[in-house]
Image (cartoon, rainbow, N blue to C red):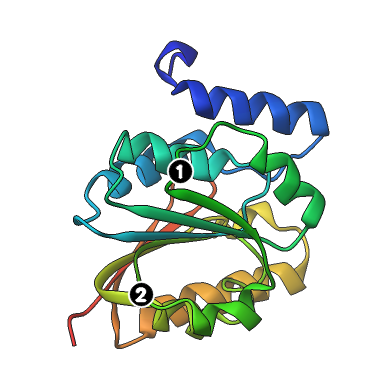
Amino acid sequence: MAMSDVPGLVLETLKSAEARGFKLSCEEMVGRLLAALASAVPPGGRVLELGTGAGVGAAWLVSGLEHRSDVTVLTLERDPELAAAAREFAWPEWVEVRVADVEKELPELGRFDLIFADAEGGKWSGLDLTVSALQPSGVLVVDDMDLSRYPSIKHRESVTRVRDTILSDPRLVAVDLPVSSGIMVAAKRRD
C-alpha cells in the first residue's frame, strides 16, 4: 500500500517509533483493521487500547474515528517514558494516554465498545479482565497470534493459550485471521 494513503498522524507515530528504536508497533494491516472497526463504534462509544507503545495503534484508531468527538479513546501504557513520548502528538481532546498497570486498572474502567489488546497485561495475562471489559456486542482485537513468529516453545505455548481462550470463551464469537502478525477478532455476545 502506498504511504500516501497512510494517515498523517500514523506517519508521525511511525517516524517517532523508528527514531526511538521501538520495533513493537502494530503492523499496517492491523492498523487498517483498527481504523475500520473504530469507524463503526456507536455514538457515545468508548475505545480502549492496551499497550500504547509509540502511539501507532492509537493513531490508526483515531484515523478511523476522524473528528468524532462523541467517542473517547483511552490508551494505557505501563512504561512512563513511552507514554510521555506518545503524549507529545497532537491527539484530539477525546484521546487520553495514561500510564497504568493494565491488570490493576482494567476492572475499574468500565466497559468498552472496542478493545485492542496489544500489551502483556490484558492479553498474555489477565485476558479474562479484558473480555469482561467489553460491552455486549463490543469487539476485541488481538494481534501477534501467528505461531510461526515465535521460536521459543514458551512463547508458542502462550500464543496457543490466548488463541484457545478466545476461541472457546462462550461469551465471544471469534475468528482467527492468519494474516499480518496473526489477528484474532471477537465480538462479545449480547447479555
- Report x, y in % for residue 41: 25, 54
Front residue of this view, candidates 183 and 119: 119
Q: Quadrant of the C terminus?
A: bottom left
Indicate the amino acid at tag 2: Leu
Q: In the rendered image of this protein, does residue 146 appear above or below residue 186?
A: above
Label 1's element?
Answer: loop
16 to the left or right of 71: right
Rendered residue at 54%/48% (across/down): 181
Quadrant assignment, res 1: top left
146 to the left or right of 17: left
Q: Residues within 10 Å of mark 2 (few under 14, many from 20)?
A: many
Label 2's element?
Answer: strand
Residue underneath mark 2: 134
- Report x, y in % for residue 34: 39, 46
Q: CA distance from mark 1 to mark 2?
A: 23 Å
Q: In the current view of this chain or complex, which residue is farthest to the front? A: 93
* Disc nearer the start of the sequence (1/2): 1
Q: Residues within 10 Å of mark 1 (few under 14, many from 20)?
A: few
Rendered residue at 41%/84% (across/down): 132
Q: Nearer the viewer, mark 1 or mark 2?
A: 1
Q: Which mark is residue 93?
A: 1
Q: In the rendered image of this protein, does residue 71 appear above or below residue 165?
A: above
- Report x, y in % for residue 57: 52, 44
Front residue of this view, candidates 77 and 119: 77
Rendered residue at 81%/49% (across/down): 81
Q: In the rendered image of this protein, does residue 156 appear above or below residue 118?
A: below
Quadrant assignment, res 183: bottom left
Front residue of this view, candidates 75 and 148: 75
40 to the left or right of 143: left
Indicate the amino acid at tag 1: Glu
Rendered residue at 81%/33% (across/down): 20
